[in-house]
Image (cartoon, rainbow, N blue to C red):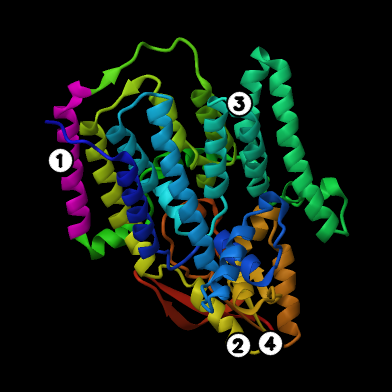
Amino acid sequence: MGIKINSGIITLIASIGIAIIYFSFPFAEPSNDAIAYAAAVKWGYDFWNPHHLLHPVPARIVLYLFLLFDSKISPATALISWNILSAIAIFNFLIKYLQKIRNWDYLPSLFAGLITLFSFGVWRFAIEGEAYLAPLAISVWAWYLNQSNQKTLGSILWGLAILFHQEFILFPAIIYGMEIIRFPKNTLKHIIITGIVVVSGYSIIYLLYTTHINFAEFLFRDFVQGNASFFPNYKALLLIPISLIRTWFQIHGFQSDWSAHHPEIIVSEIIMFLICLVWIFYKRKTIHFYPIYKTLNASDYLFLGFFLFSAWFGGNAEFMVPLTILIWTSISARINFSIHQLLPICIFVFFWNLGMGIIPKSLYHWNPESQIVQQYQTFPNNTWWVVQDHNTISNGILLSTGIYPERIMPSPSYYQQKFGSTDILYQKIDSLLKSGNKIFTDCPGRPSTMSRSAWMIDDSHDFWQQFFIQQKYIIHCYSKDFPISEINLRNP
């Protein structure tokens, strides 16, 4: 006698379990953007950023709801709460899509959804305040409605997704581009609906809150200012395959230090990988292949579109997050996996990312930026800083004080990359020191960890030879010590 599965109850229990796991491991060191968004929620600083216009709004609502009950949560927690809700919406979409559109059984659909939510790309952004999961959740549900003959509602949701992040114009652009050839009049109507939602949203905010720039400059502000622009070089192109892998499995330079401190974890991960591999190989005959498609479908074009978009931006990890969903909507048209393949994959993805990605970043500080943020606020007002990660430190100070700091300067490598020269920085330092100011830095002698940012940064050793660098103290982090030095003129 077969066991009857109540899919609704299982999905609900799984959703609650995912939320508990996510909430249990917030990152100790949020990303620069996540800190900036928390500052927007807390202080209203750059609240209506047109590149991700509506992103802070739900978190601000969450804060107000807690205040109604005389409770308080941090802006970061409010953003994380919204992102976790968005991740669960993605989870439910994928189960529904694979069952209704691809005719998969419930349990394989469930585990495909779990693999997606435990992939590093989704897991990471669910426990930070980043701006990508909400528009992704809205986009995929709009796509589902589009395929379920609820195209008008889907068109409205696509407009809403673009208001949450401009990147997600790719979804309707690709789908409408495919449909307009076959259904020109109907597709044009839905393009207009999406456009009305987008233009209306931007127009309302522009008229209420913006006065110093014209509408076009407001709409494309991040592109005009260069914040959303990128021109790939050979270093960025080499990172594309690594970024693609990292979308599912965390791979980072800090893992060598983590493994050295905890060899039992990496040994356990390797053993688990081998067991899962044998399991999948043993059950390989349970995979069912459909007749091969001779043409690409919508999922294929969406996958390709987001991959190429991410590749153009140097393998940008944020833009690869949609691939965690689109890979399932694409391959499910060709392959019907059984639980015998998906369960071991799910187990390995979960434990690898938990043990080698989430836990070390949740429990420990690996970089000095958070301590520099605190020190900036205690040092005298004539103290300036030249720092490697000026955005994270500046946004951290903004989040703490509500005031964007003026005494933080980027590293020499930043000036070299942006202006092709470090002369501007040299002149600033020279002028400040001659005016009696003190300048500290975390750049000279900074230990390196192999990462995307470290790979992209040019060596600035020669720059510091122009000054007398005196080490003052050490910031101790989990696996490395970061020297903080004072900058002085060689011939004052």
Is label 1 or label 3 in front?
Answer: 3
Query: Dot 2, crowdedness within 10 Å: few (<14), some or many (≥20)?
Result: few
- The amino acid type of the residue labelled 3 equals Ile
State the SS at label 2: loop
State the SS at label 1: helix
State the SS at label 3: helix
* Magenta-colored stretch includes residue 267: yes
Name the residue tied to disc 4.
381
Query: Dot 4, crowdedness within 10 Å: few (<14), some or many (≥20)?
Result: few
Marks 4/1 in contact by CB < 8 Å: the verdict is no
Residue visible at 41% across and 27% down in the picture: 100
Name the residue tied to disc 3.
175
Marks 3/4 in contact by CB < 8 Å: the verdict is no
How far is disc 2 from disc 1 in space, using C-alphas?
54 Å
- The amino acid type of the residue labelled 4 equals Asn
How far is disc 3 from disc 4 in space, using C-alphas?
55 Å
Is label 2 or label 1 in front?
Answer: 1
The residue lying toward the viewer, choosing from 52 and 444, is 52
Name the residue tied to disc 2.
379
User: Which is more N-terminal, label 1 or label 4?
Assistant: 1
Query: Dot 3, crowdedness within 10 Å: few (<14), some or many (≥20)?
Result: some
User: Which is more N-terminal, label 4 or label 3?
Assistant: 3
Q: Which residues are magenta?
A: 264-286
